[in-house]
Amino acid sequence: MSTYVFGHTSPDSDSIVGAISLSYLKNQLGEDCVPTRQGEISAETEFILNKFGGTLPELKTSVAGEKVYIIDFSDKAQAPKDIMQATILGIVDHHKLGDLTTDTPLECWIRPIGCSNTVVKEMYDYHKVEIPKDIAGMMMCAILSDTVIFKSPTCTKVDTKAVKELAAICGVEDYKALAMEMFIAKSAVNGASARNLNTRDYKMFEMNGSKVGINQLEMVDISVLESRKQELLEDMKKMKEEDALHTVVVLLTDIMKEGSQLLVVSDDESKIEAAFDIKLQNSQAWLPGVLSRKKQVIPFLQPQFR
Ligand code: MG
Ligand code: MG
Ligand code: MG
């Protein structure tokens, strides 16, 4: 029986590539692993798979009775609904520790670094397994995406070193130029519905009994969304009602200006104002320097719910 390897809901490039890179490693180590995904892939991930000839992992949203490895998350709210009926063999991640627990011993590789694929790179090195060219290219792109081309405060020396080594393996010299191409592919918003934009990189968190949904759009120029903010806020209100959420936050992150426009729909706006020491105007605020949801948003929001 195969073991399934997958990342979080609304999968980003780290989740998809991580499923592929971790499965390959486990297969080399004699385990029978299959990469899967919990949802549709982004334009950025499509760009990466096309660039390096990667295969799209199969869609799998139910895992009861299966053995699994999870990568790039450990929050129940980002797992398949029946995750507690699966056997989690291991977690590979770079986020805060979530609320998933297990009945059996497991392997854990959780590090406070820029990308799950950097952790996977360390696993390859630890096991002395050679990384194939195509997988190295995809891992490199996942790290460049998660670290916003090394600009994110989550980025560490381990990540930059991993990118350099992976670039040498896959034969890409100007990896920063490739990363810009990737972010431009990711920034395409023409013809996208408000719901599509609001769920592109959407994560739900349980904060002391309150459900908080946070979406992040990382773009090379957020001004193209200026005329659509009201529409986004209207749709956020609908999302809040549909899932009985306390708060919906959307971060429009401008990777060139290095900051995020915050959009908020909440039962209690004062919690968000207190978290970031700001005053919301029309449910919005500009957060200079904020690029990382995991390091600059969640740690400030979560204490407001205690
Ligand atoms: Mg992720
Ligand atoms: Mg990640
Ligand atoms: Mg990200």
Image (cartoon, grey):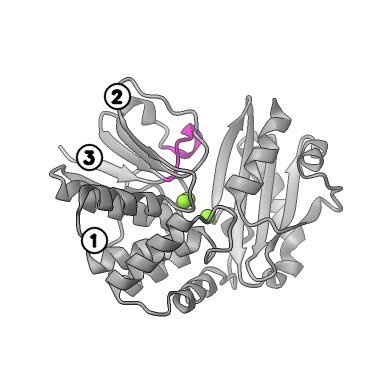
From this viewpoint, which residue is outermost toward the left? Answer: 30
**Residue 142 at x, y = what percent?**
42, 61
Query: How far apart are the alpha carbons under marks 1 and 2?
Result: 28 Å
Q: Which mark is residue 131?
A: 1
| The magenta stretch spans residue 139 | no
Q: Nearer the viewer, residue 293 or 43?
A: 293
Q: Is the Cβ of the residue at disc 1 closer than 8 Å to that at disc 2?
A: no
Q: Earlier in the sequence, mark 2 or mark 3?
A: 3
Check disc 2: other Cα within 10 Å, few if <14, some if 14-19, many if 20+.
few
| The magenta stretch spans residue 75 | yes
Q: Earlier in the sequence, mark 3 or mark 1?
A: 3
**Residue 197 at x, y = what percent?**
60, 59
Residue pictured at 25% horizontal, 69% vertical: 133
Q: Which mark is residue 105?
A: 2
Query: How far apart are the alpha carbons under marks 2 and 3?
Result: 16 Å
In this figure, which residue is indicated by the disc labeled 3?
Answer: 3
Q: Amino acid at mark 1?
A: Ile
Q: Is label 3 in a helix, a strand or a loop?
A: strand
Query: How far apart are the alpha carbons under marks 3 and 1?
Result: 21 Å
In this picture, which residue range is highlighted in magenta?
A: 72-79
Q: Nearer the viewer, residue 272 or 234?
A: 272
| Picture quadrant where residue 161 is located | bottom left
Report the quarter where the N terminus lies: top left
Residue pictured at 27% horizontal, 53% vertical: 125
Q: Is the Cβ of the residue at disc 2 closer than 8 Å to that at disc 3?
A: no
- Magenta: main secondary structure equals loop
Q: Nearer the viewer, residue 197 or 187?
A: 187
- Which dot, 3 or 1, sits closer to the camera? 1
In the image, residue 21 sits, relative to residue 52, either above or below, namely: above
